[in-house]
Amino acid sequence: MADPRQVTRFLGYVPDKAFLYEKLSGREHLEFVGEMRGLDRKRVAEAIGRVSEQFGLTEFLDDLTETYSHGMNQRLVFASALVHDPPVLVVDEPMVGLDPRSGRMVKDLLRARASSGKVVFMSTHTLAVAEEIADKIGVIDRGRLIFLGTQDELERELSAGKTSLEQLFLQLTAESGQDDGRSAASAGSALPRGTPVVDGSQDGAARSAGSETGLSGNLAAKQDPPK
């Protein structure tokens, strides 16, 4: 692509820490983001109506974001990431600060986007979240992909029986000689296509390894090594 900025029209990003312009209202923030993503004013207005209803923000759209609670900030950040309906969504620790109802809404949203054929790439320290949503797992140890498959396949490989993804991760990395914090776990979403790989080493760098059919509807879980 000749203009790298055009790439942003295809990407949505939800960071683990929300950044908002506190002296803008929720509506003004969404207008700013939408226009920055290349939408004209008519499409921005339509998109704001869509995402504000989706994330329960309609009542608070014209309040300054400095008055928002942490959970409302997080919902506005999600709305900002999706205002241009990107084909690729990158999400980092989306459950932080969310109440159970909002957390369920986010999980359902990610599933819905994955089911529609869009790409979702989620990084999280909480393997239980990935276990609930995902069906493909990749584990990197010392820069090597040491497992790729479903959780059931990993259980069979380790002769572990039915157990949690966290226990499987700990057992697998222990058996591969992990003792210096250079391992990672990742998980793919409920869709079968594509597999993300997230490096859980100390620098927390993220990488992805797509299947031949390409990344589609993926969710990744990052597990930091025990201290």
Image (cartoon, grey):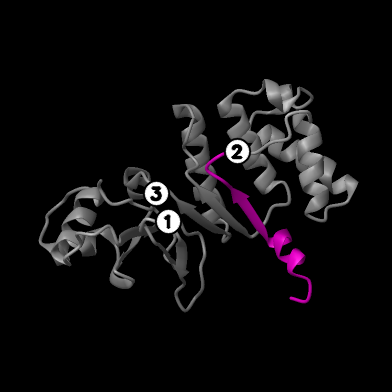
Q: Residue tagged by mark 3?
A: 133
Report, in whole angstroms, how far the alpha carbon at label 3 lies from the one at label 2.
23 Å
Write down the quadrant of residue 66 in the picture.
top right
- The spot of residue 33 in percent (x, y) is 76, 46
Q: Which residue is drawn at 75% across and 27% down?
A: 61
Single out the mark in the foreground, 3 or 1.
Answer: 1
Q: Where is residue 169 in the image (x, y as percent from the top left)?
A: 23, 56
Q: Are marks 3 and 2 in contact (CB under 8 Å)?
A: no
Crowd band around label 3 with a 10 angstrom C-alpha radius: few (<14), some (14–19), many (20+): many
Find the residue positioned furthest to the right.
41
Q: In which quarter of the image is the N terminus?
A: bottom right
**Residue denoted by label 2:** 18
First of labels 3, 2 by sequence position: 2
Amino acid type assigned to the residue bearing label 2 in the image: Ala
C-alpha span from label 3 to label 1? 22 Å
> Which is more N-terminal, label 1 or label 3?
3
Which residue occupies 67% across, 47% down? 82
- Numbered disc 1: secondary structure: loop
Looking at the rendering, the stretch of residues picked out in magenta corresponds to: 1-18
Disc 3 versus disc 2: nearer the observer: 2
In terms of secondary structure, where does tag 2 sit?
Answer: loop
Residue 215 is a magenta residue: no
